[in-house]
Image (cartoon, rainbow, N blue to C red):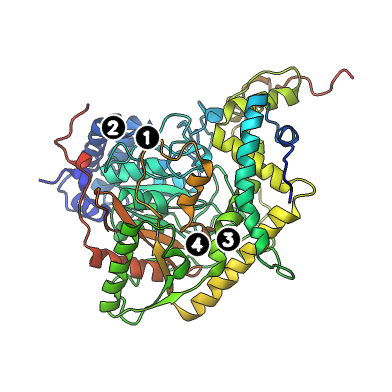
Amino acid sequence: MTDLADLSIAAAGSGLRGGEFTARDLTDAVLTRAAITEAHLHAYLTLDQEGARAAADAADADFSAGTDRGPLQGIPIAVKDNMVTRGIETTAGSKILAGYVPPYNATVVDRLHGQGVVIVGKTNLDEFAMGSSTENSAFGPTRNPWNTDRVPGGSSGGSAAAVAVGSALGALGSDTGGSIRQPASLCGLVGVKPTYGVVSRYGLIAFASSLDQIGPFARNVRDAATLLEAVAGFDIHDATSYRGDTPDISSLMDAGVEGMKIGIVSELAGDGIDPEVNAACRHMYDALSDAGADLREVSLPATEYALSAYYLIAPAEASANLARFDGVRYGLRVDGETTEDMMSNTRAEGFGPEVIRRILLGTYALSAGYYEAFYGQAQRVRTLLRNEFADAYARVDVLVSPTSPTTAFAIGEKTSDPLSMYFADVCTIASNLGGDPSGSIPIGFDGDGMPIGFQIMAPALHEAQLFRLAAAVERLAGVDARPALATSEVRPA
Amino acid sequence: MPAEIDIAKVAKLARLALSQEELDLYGSQLEDILEHAERVGALPTEGVPPTSHPLPMTNAFRADEVRPSLERDEVLEQAPARQGEYFRVPKILGDT
């Protein structure tokens, strides 16, 4: 019999409604899985066992009373620890917020609660979501369930590891330059960054406000759509929330790819991409072509400059956003003679090296004399990039590429060279600069058994096209392997 | 483009009390990163407007209605130091 922790969200929902098991059974199975796997992975910063069991019991009471709040009622979901949770410690992976217990919920957390979701806990991340490996967490790294000597990707590495191993059935992450899609790719999951503004950022601890978006991790495309539908929609508390109708997400998932116009991004198909990753993507292009899709190469020359523009824009915004961590209202305080000394001491002590690096970079890029050459120029390159994408989307429905230039790399491999770590985002960054939706779908494994992800990019608010192709890619790839660590024979080390 | 970064000045602007050793390390790392980031200067952008935000939106208004705010005590409880209903900080004005 399948362990309940290995069920998809859809299958668990059917089982709950068919009376095969209770939400409490399901939550207990997930907590048991976490008890086995956490010693190996460290996916969670906080496991809320008590809260999870109480929420499961409440979901069961609702089922008994005939109240159905939707497809996520009673489903155990994990939340990245940069989304605030009332009464539950929220650190963003930073020592500067250790012990912080928020007095309010992020809008996405309220939405999950309102739909009867069981929130299992808060997942590990690179400090303030800055990183591509989850090694920048002040509380220690998360490991990849497929090989615990490798990174899970980042910054949402804890969410990815939890869903891959079954210590949650789905999870929320945040994506500023690839922080959902890259860990999804490295952990063999579906991960989606929706159109900017489609999911509220209220209560998401801000990294780079014009780039940050919350999105789902799941083990299949259908589950990812369900989770995204649960959190999408206008929110009065977020001034940048999209005010139009919430875009269609899942109505085309059975439409197939016949006649779909798919552009392969030339600049992301050659140099710098691992040969095995390239080969797996080419294999998928052929399969899509055989299935009736119309594939063609599309050149987007400005993507070559996207990484450079991103590493000016994101740190610039971060340097402003992180000014709020000053030892006055919450979190760490390190004393000083004056208030300014106290602030400077607190920040130097409370922030880790990558966060300090980016604050310095952003402060410099915004400072008098350099603003135009760096930040101003990066914003203009952002416009050029958006124009190129708009031109491309006049000719094709979606764009595709690898998600990550490599599969999961070894823990410690890139920590001493910040720039080499930044290249992990080379394929994912353009969608953040453009504000467009994109997602990663698992399509196979490399020779070491590490997952390979396939990236789909779509025009703003065309999530339906993204999910249409994602569903087709999932069917064609037929990946159904699970990490050995997810099998219940594994016992604590 | 600048060859040298006055890293001590940048750290002061960012309110980061770093040691000389840290300043040297971050200074050299920043030079490497900026060398790569400077590539943005290679693209001709004359007449191209900057993009600061992905959504074509201007002002976002909401109805001016009274709504409950956060519980004051719950908020103050998170402060490293408080005095009554206030956040407490060291002295702000210097002697000089």
Q: Residue furthest bottom?
A: A259
Cα distance between the residues tagged 3 and 1: 35 Å
Which residue corresponds to the image point at 70% horizontal and 31% vertical from the top-left? B15
Q: Are marks 4 and 1 in contact (CB under 8 Å)?
A: no
Q: Which residue is mark 2?
A: A40
| Same chain for the residues under marks 4 and 1 in the image | yes
In the rendered image, which quarter is residue A281 located in? Answer: bottom left
Q: Are marks 3 and 2 in contact (CB under 8 Å)?
A: no
**Label 1: few (<14), some or many (≥20) within 10 Å?**
many
Q: Which residue is mark 4?
A: A195
Q: Chain of mark 4?
A: A
Q: Which residue is mark 1?
A: A44
Q: Residue A438 at what x, y percent from top left?
A: 44, 62
Q: Chain of mark 2?
A: A
Dot 3 or dot 1: first in sequence order is: 1
Q: Residue A388 at what x, y percent from top left?
A: 56, 72
**Residue B84 relative to residue A430: left or right:** right
**Label 2: few (<14), some or many (≥20) within 10 Å?**
some
In the rendered image, which quarter is residue B40 located in? Answer: bottom right
Say which quadrant the C terminus of chain A sits in. top left
Q: Which mark is residue A305?
A: 3
Cα distance between the residues tagged 2 and 1: 11 Å
In the rendered image, which quarter is residue A443 located in? Answer: bottom left
